[in-house]
Amino acid sequence: MFDLNTCIRKNILDLQPYRCARDDFSEGILLDANECSFGSVINDCGIEYNRYPDPRQNDLKRRFCDLRNKEHPLAKPLKPENMVVGVGSDEIIDSLIRISCVPGKDKILACPPSYGMYSVSAKINDVQVVNVLLKPNFDLDIDAVYDTLSKDNSIKLVFTCSPGNPTAKALKLDDVKKLLAHPTWNGIVVVDEAYIDFASPEKTAISLVNDYPNLAVCQTLSKSFGLAGIRIGFCLTNPDIAAIMNSLKAPYNISQPTSSLAIKALSPESVSKMYEHRDRALTQRDRLCKEITAIPGVGKIIGGLDANFILVQVLSKPVNGVPSNDVARFVYLKMATDHKVVVRFRGTEPMCEGSLRITVGTESEVTAVLDTFRRTLEEYYSKN
Ligand SMILES: Cc1ncc(COP(=O)(O)O)c(C=O)c1O
C-alpha cells in the first residue's frame, strides 16, 4: 500500500528547496543573481548566455505534455505538474533513488537483463540491488517480483524497462498495473520508456500516470528525437512525486542552449521529422531481421521488436549450432577492429548467451553490418 510520507526519505520530505529572487521576479533590471550584466563573451543564436536558465522549464514541460496528450488522448491529460526534466533520463534514475532510498539501508529491485544504470546509480548511492530475472520470454516474472516485494519492505523502487534494453520487448501493462496495486509493498514502480516511440502506441504506461500515486515513467529525447548529445530526459509521474523530485534537483540543471534546442525539437516540424526517422528505422529493422537471420550461423532474434535495436544470437556452428559467447565475442571484436562496425556484445547477460545487440542504422549502415557479419562468421567457421 503506497504511502508517500513513509516511502520518501524523511530528510527529502523536510527539504526546503533552494529559492532565488527570480522565482518571484524575472523581468526588469536583473541584479539579483550576480550574473554579468555586460553580456556573455560569445553571442550566438540570440540566447542570453549570461543569464541563468529557467529552473522550472515550464515551456518545455508544456510542449512535451502537449505532444504526448495529442498522441494519446487521455481521460486525465498530463500537465507540467506531472513532470521533472533531467540531464538525460540517467539523472531521473539517480533522482528517483535519492528521494526514496536511505543509503546503506534501502534497496531497489531490478529485472535483468536490463539497463545497467539502475544498479550503477544504486551502488553510487550505497543502495543494494535485488535482482529478479525476467522470464525466458523477457516478460516480467510478475509472481516472483510480487513475492519479493511482499517479503522485503526495504525495497523502495522497482525498475522496469519497456521496451527493454537489451531485450527490445515492451512489457505488458497488466503486469505493471499488478505491481502498482501491490497490497502491502510501499514503493514506486519505475517504467523506463527510453525507446517507447519505436513501439506501438498502446504500450506506453503514461496513460496510468494520473491513476496511480506510485508510478514514474521515464522518457528521453536521446533516442527517437536523435538528441542524445543535448541530454534531456523526463519523468512523468504523480504531481506529489514530481514536486519532491523538483525540490531535490540542482536549480539550473538544464542549460539554456539545451532547453532552447529541446523546445525546438517539440515543434510540429521537428516532431514530423522524428516520426519520419522512426518509420525509416522500423523499415530498416524489418530488413535487418529478415536478412541477418538468413546468414549461416545466425540464430534467433531473441526478445521483441519494439525498439530501434535487435538482440540476435550467434551460433557455435553454421548448421545445428547452439548459442555461443566465443563466437559472439569474436564477431564483436573482429567487426569493430577490422571493419570499424561496432555493435554490442550482450552474451554475459542472463538468458542472452551468444547474443549481440545491434542498433538499426541507415540503409547503408545496415548493408555494412550485414555484409561484415556474414564475412566475419565465415572467417570464424573456416578457422574453427
Ligand atoms: C533503457 C535506457 N534508459 C535510459 C537511457 C539513458 O537515456 P538518457 O540519454 O536520456 O540519459 C538509456 C540509454 O541507452 C537506455 O537504454
Image (cartoon, rainbow, N blue to C red):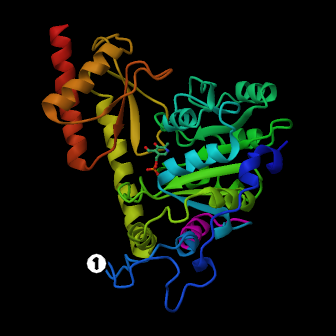
Q: Nearer the viewer, residue 21 or 183?
A: 21
**Residue shown at the point (16%, 25%) measured from the top left:** 375
Q: Quadrant of the C terminus?
A: top left
Q: On the picture, is 158 further left or further right than 358?
A: right
Of residues 89 and 179, the one nearer the viewer is: 89
- Specify the quadrant of the image occupied by residue 347: top left
- Label 1's element? loop
**Residue 353 sits above or below residue 110 on the image:** above
Q: Quadrant of residue 207?
A: bottom right
* Direction from residue 12 to residue 3 in the image, left or right: right
Q: Is residue 79 visible?
A: no
Q: Position of residue 29 (x, y in %)?
A: 49, 91
**Which amino acid, by three-letter code, is at mark 1?**
Asp
Q: Quadrant of the N terminus?
A: top right
| Magenta stretch secondary structure, dominant | helix
> Against 192, is 25 above or below?
below
Q: Give me the residue at 40% from left, 56% from top.
A: 278
Q: Is 360 left, or right, of 109 in this rendering? A: left
Residue visible at 64% across and 25% down? 132
Q: Residue furthest top?
A: 384
Outermost left residue: 338
- In the image, residue 204 above or below residue 51: above
- Residue beneath the point at 61% across and 53% down: 202
Q: Is residue 206 above or below residue 266?
A: above
Closer to the camera, 170 or 24?
Answer: 24
Q: From which residue to which does the magenta span run?
A: 63-75
Residue sitting nearer the eye, 293 or 155? 155
Where residue 363 sits: x, y (%)? 24, 49
Q: Quadrant of residue 161?
A: top right
